[in-house]
Image: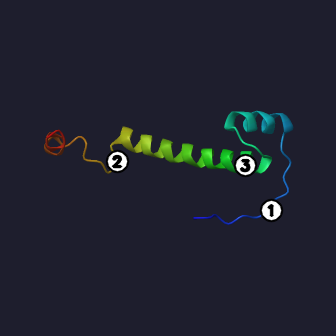
């Protein structure tokens, strides 16, 4: 599944880009930027899931009957 791509003109701090490229193991600036953006989105999704688990929002993990059946 390919995402839509558009060209953007942005000012990017060279030192931060170099560090991010190194950390991500990216071969190009384009790869580094796209991977960094994907990591930000993934982090936000993980935080949302962690918040949901912490709040038990919409989950039945605190239901003794449900949990008793989960360990069979």
Task: Quadrant for the C terminus, please.
Answer: top left
Q: Is residue 60 left or right of residue 37?
A: left
Marks 1/3: CA distance?
13 Å
Residue 5: image quadrant is bottom right
The x and y percentages for residue 70 are 19, 42
Q: Earlier in the sequence, mark 1 or mark 3?
A: 1
Tell whether 4 sits left or right of 68. right
* Residue identified by numbered label 1: 7
User: Which disc, if any, is residue 57?
Assistant: 2
Q: The residue tagged with tag 3: helix, strand or loop?
A: helix
**Helix, strand or loop for disc 1:** loop
Q: Residue 32 is drawn in which quadrant?
A: top right
Q: Are marks 3 and 2 in contact (CB under 8 Å)?
A: no
Cα separation, mark 3 vs mark 2, equals: 36 Å
Q: Which mark is residue 55?
A: none
Mark toward the start of the polypeptide (2 vs 1) = 1
Q: Residue at x 57, y 64 (%)?
A: 1
Say left or right for 67 vs 10.
Answer: left
């Amino acid at each position: 599944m390919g995402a839509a791509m558009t060209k953007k003109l942005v000012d990017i701090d060279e030192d931060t880009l170099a560090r991010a490229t190194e950390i991500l193991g990216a071969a190009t600036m384009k790869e580094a930027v796209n991977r960094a953006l994907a990591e930000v989105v993934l982090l936000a999704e993980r935080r949302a899931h962690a918040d949901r688990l912490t709040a038990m929002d919409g989950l039945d993990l605190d239901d003794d009957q449900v949990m008793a059946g989960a360990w069979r």
